Image (tube, rainbow, N blue to C red):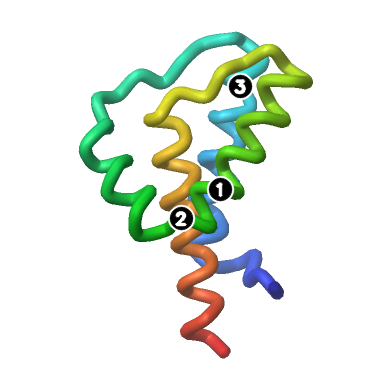
Amino acid sequence: MAIDEQSIGYQRFITHIKFFALRVLRKTELNDDVNDLFNLIKKKHEKTVNCVNAIGDFIKKNYQYQMTDAEKLYLTVHIENMMQRQKHSI
């Protein structure tokens, strides 16, 4: 998948990743109440959520940091947005 690094979606994704990395390294959690929304997203974007869960497993194993559902939701949304924009640009 080619990614347009100049796109606003990519820039948002990178910003999210930077803040996510800081939270992982500082062991601080993002705790928004997103349970209902995340359950909807899990049904609609199962493959992307599986990818995010794999990322979460990697982070937990290597950095001893448990991603919250809020973090998983936001990461899923950013990845899904990039994938959708890529599909529409082809």
Q: State if disc 1 and disc 2 touch (CB < 8 Å).
A: yes
Q: Image check: 38 left or right of 3?
A: left
From mark 1 to mark 3, how far is it between C-alphas? 23 Å
Structural crowding at the residue carrying mark 3, measured as other residues with C-alpha within 10 Å and reported as few (<14), some (14–19) or many (≥20): few
Q: Mark 3 and mark 1 in contact (Cβ < 8 Å)?
A: no
Q: Which labelled disc corresponds to residue 50?
A: 1
Amino acid marked by disc 2: Glu
Q: Which residue is mark 3?
A: 22
* Coordinates of residue 37 in the picture (x, y in percent): 25, 42
Local crowd at mark 2 within 10 Å, few (<14), some, or many (≥20)? few
Count of number-bearing discs: 3
Q: Position of residue 54 (x, y in %)?
A: 65, 40
- Give the image quarter of residue 11: bottom right
Q: Is residue 6 above or below residue 17?
A: below
- Which dot, 3 or 2, sits closer to the camera? 2
**Residue 1 in the figure: left or right of residue 31:** right
Residue 36: give x, y in percent of width and height: 21, 37
* Pointer 2 residue: 46
At x 51% / y 11%, what residue is drawn?
A: 28
Q: Secondary structure at mark 3?
A: helix
Q: Are marks 3 and 2 in contact (CB under 8 Å)?
A: no
Q: Residue at x 42, y 41 (%)?
A: 74
Up the image or down, 33 lies above or below 4; here it is above
The mark nearer the N terminus, 3 or 2, is 3
Q: Nearer the viewer, mark 1 or mark 3?
A: 1
Q: Nearer the viewer, residue 83 or 3?
A: 83
Q: Disc 1 marks which amino acid? A: Asn
Q: CA distance from mark 3 to mark 2?
A: 27 Å
Task: Please identify the quarter of the rendering in which residue 2 is found.
Answer: bottom right
Q: Nearer the viewer, residue 73 or 2?
A: 73
Q: Residue 12 appears at what percent x and percent y?
A: 49, 51
